[in-house]
Amino acid sequence: MDKVLSFHRGTLPLLVSMPHAGLGLTPTVRHGLVPAARSLPDTDWHIPRLYEFVAGMGASVVAAEYSRFVIDLNRPDDDAPLYAGATTGLFPATLFDGQPLFEDGRAPGAEERAGYLDTIWRPYHRTLRDELERLRDAFGYALLWDAHSIRAHIPHLFDGTLPDFNLGTFNGASCDPALAERLESVCAQAPGYRHVLNGRFKGGHITRHYGDPVQHVHAVQLELAQRTYMEEVEPFAYREDLAQPTQAVLQRLLEAMLAWGRERYGR
C-alpha cells in the first residue's frame, strides 16, 4: 500500500484523531461502488482543514488517508457492532441512507479485505496506541480527541435532526466526568449552537477502546453536524463563513480539555 495515514507529533499531552477524513480508494473499491457512492458522501469532509489550527497549538494529529468505504478505522477489528439499530461495519456494505455501497458481486473479497485490515487499519491503531503511550509517559496522562462530522439529518441512522456538537464519552466510561462537564460548559456558552452529551453518538471504537481514565487516558469523540461548516450536499463545499465561528468553539473546547488536564495532573 502507499501512504495510509498522516501523522504530526506535537508537544502537548493531546492527540487529535481523524479516522474518517480519508478520500483514498483501492482499485477494487473504486470500480465496485454504486453511482451514488462515487462522490464519497459519507466522508467526514474537510475535517483536517477545520482542525488545521491544532498543530499550531502543539497537539499531535493523526489522520486517515483512505476512505471509510475501504475500511472503517472507528470499528473494532472483529467487526462487533457498536450501536443498536442501523449502523455500518468494519467493511461497510451500505451508505448511510441504507442503499447498497457496491454493485452486485463487486465488493472486495475476504482476502483483499484482510489486506486492508493489515495495511490500513492496523497502522492507524498502532500510531494511536504508540502516541498515547508516549504522551502518558511524558506527561503522566494523555488526552484523545476523536474528530468526526456527519450530515445533520439521516433518517436511516437516527430520528430528527442532530444537535450541532455531539460529544461522546461512552456514557462516562472513556473520560473523567469533570472533563465532560467542562466541555459541556464550553458548548453551552457558544451562542447559536446546540449540543448533547452521549446522545445518538456515544463514541465509536477509538473512544471506547483507548479511553481509560483509571490509566490516565481520557478520550472524547465529537460528532459535529456538517451544517456548521460546510454544505451537506454535493459538491460538499467548505463554507468559510460558517467554519470560522465553529473553529472558535472547537479551539475553546480543546483549550478547556488541556486546562482540565493541567489542573488535574499538575502539568
Image (spheres, helix red, strand yellow):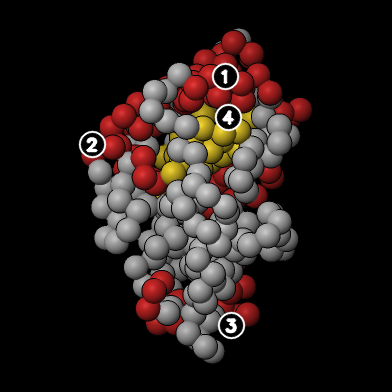
Q: Position of residue 160 (x, y in %)?
A: 53, 49
Question: Few, some or many C-alpha atoms within 10 Å of disc 2 (few <14, some 14-19, many ≥20)?
Answer: few
User: What amino acid type is highlighted by mark number 1?
Assistant: Arg
Q: Give the mark, 2 or 1, whose residue is nearer the N terminus.
A: 1
Q: Give the mark, 4 or 2, whose residue is nearer the N terminus.
A: 4
Please name whichever residue, 71 or 104, is drawn nearer the observer in this view of the structure. Answer: 104
Q: Residue at x 43, y 78 (%)?
A: 33
Q: State the SS at label 2.
A: helix
Question: Few, some or many C-alpha atoms within 10 Å of disc 1 (few <14, some 14-19, many ≥20)?
Answer: some
Q: Is residue 13 above or below residue 82?
A: above
C-alpha gap between disc 3 and disc 4: 37 Å
User: What amino acid type is highlighted by mark number 3?
Assistant: Gly
Q: Tell me the residue that label 4 is attached to.
A: 143
User: What amino acid type is highlighted by mark number 2?
Assistant: Asp
Q: Position of residue 137 (x, y in %)?
A: 63, 27
Q: Kindly identify which numbered label has been placed on residue 182.
A: 1
Q: Tell me the residue that label 2 is attached to.
A: 241
Q: Is residue 132 left or right of 96 when viewed as pictured?
A: right
C-alpha gap between disc 3 and disc 2: 43 Å
Q: Position of residue 98 (x, y in %)?
A: 54, 69
Q: State the SS at label 3.
A: loop
C-alpha gap between disc 1 and disc 4: 14 Å
Q: Kindly identify which numbered label has been placed on residue 109.
A: 3
Q: Kindly identify which numbered label has been placed on residue 258.
A: none
C-alpha gap between disc 3 and disc 1: 46 Å
